Amino acid sequence: MKGGFSFWPCFGYDRSSDDADVDRDPVLLVSGIAGSILNSKSYTVSLEKDKDLVVPDDDYGLYAIDILDPSTVMKCLHVTGVYHFHEMIDMLVKCGYKKGTTLFGYGYDFRQSVRIDKLMDGLKTKLETAYTASGGRKVSIISHSMGGLLLQCFLTLHNDVFAKYVNKWICIACPFQGAPGCINDSLLTGLQFVEGFQSFFFVSRWSMHQLLIECPSIYEMLANPEFKWKKQPEIKVWRKQCKDVETSVELKTYAGPEIITLFEEALQNNELEYDGKTIPLPFNSTILEWATGTWQVLKNAKLPEGVSFYNIYGTSFDTPYDVCYGSEKSPIEDLPEICHSTAEYGYVDGDGTVPSESAMADGFEAVERVAMAAGHRQLLADNSVFQYIQKWLGIEQKTSINHSKTSRVADIPSRAWPGVRGGGTWGGSEGKGRGGEGFAEDGVRASRAWGCGRRHRGVIGDEAQVVDDDGKVTGDGEDWGRKG
């Protein structure tokens, strides 16, 4: 072995520790949406009631959240689109963490609501296991994306358990107030996880659309209706209007409760053909009602005394916020046509999936909030993020890790809506520009890009932001190195 890599790249990284005898408090990694392997008890995933999906608990829960398709072919091709906590697990093992003693993972059925008993009980069991295996030491949790909402619900529903077992919570890229652009478009047209040749290894956008309509977790990441956004998220539709013999085109805007009405009308005829049967899949009002209850649970979350909270969120990537369907030249005549169209996005600053405005609005008293110029999934493999994690976990750094480029975000002038439509990529870090600078309306940027995560131009400097509870910048990405 040289440099931590095997001569045969298919079999990957040498995860031996550089610090074999170090003393560490336990760490639990908690994944987000689409961040866990789901295995069917049958050969294929089925709609039949007697077929269950299970999350494998191999390797102390780490297997399910490491590489989401751990097949030899994917490793040989080095399809990094399926890497999830892979690089972070490598980093922690190199720092002396031991699987099953001080390092654990928690994967779960991410399609379900983040507050159901099964997920809450599973998290409780995992915390108890980590606490006991480490000799009664409190656990540091590192969560990603929707995993942060799961932790929020646990805080409300099992605050005493959280206080007993948890010492620190490091939250990465959590949609605390929702992810309006990505979620709105996902419910109407589905989502694509990756672009290019890697997309051949993933579920298609249409198939994912049919799945998401019945996923409570998706509804729970709609824009929080009680949050005071700088600008309310909107869906715009170019509508063809016919009156008598005259035809006109109108740009109709939906916001707040009107968006729910749009979902209901656009999805009223949505259905799935399976095994010779037609299954109706309209917008699910019952799931929406459940999600409304989840928002109240999230709202009541309180950190126990003595638990330290840290928030890392992404910036410098164009992040979907407003969504537009149709165009003046090619308008939508009937709303169900939206489900077979391609969205045009209005962008704000964020990580390509979660707006910074949402990710930093955690409502907790944070020890530190740090803005990093990285995409939603890139944050799990970013060297600068790793430095902050090591600092907060109390790991003495023997050598400096090179910083990835991080940036402060500059204001970009408002303009108008673009005339080029584009599709989107969940995770946002691989979006590809399609020429020309974007436009904006009411402070919301829009860019001509195929993909929702194109890096925007309005950045200055080469450091990360450190942000206090009032949203003020208190230092840059090098401050903690000098203070420590």
Image (cartoon, rainbow, N blue to C red):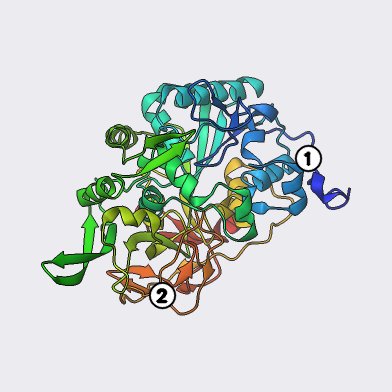
Residue 295 locus on image (x, y percent): 31, 37
Residue 369 locus on image (x, y percent): 46, 51
Q: Count the marks.
A: 2
Figure quadrant of residue 289: top left
Residue 467 visible in the current orientation: yes
Residue drawn at (61%, 24%) of the image: 41
**Is residue 368 placed above or below 306 in the rendered structure?**
below
Residue 438's disc is 2
- Local SS, label 1: loop
Residue drawn at (29%, 57%) of the image: 233
Residue assigned mark 1 = 17
| Category of crowding for the residue at label 1, using alpha-carbon neighbours closer than 10 angstroms: few (below 14), some (14–19), many (at least 20) | some
Q: Real-space Cα distance between discs 1 and 2?
A: 46 Å
Is 301 on the left-hand or right-hand side of 437?
left
Amino acid type at mark 1: Ser
Amino acid type at mark 2: Gly
- Local SS, label 2: loop
Residue drawn at (72%, 32%) of the image: 98
Residue 326 locus on image (x, y percent): 32, 65
**Proximity of marks 1 and 2: CB atoms separated by less than 8 Å:** no
Residue 484 visible in the current orientation: no
Is 159 on the left-hand or right-hand side of 453?
left
| Category of crowding for the residue at label 2, using alpha-carbon neighbours closer than 10 angstroms: few (below 14), some (14–19), many (at least 20) | many
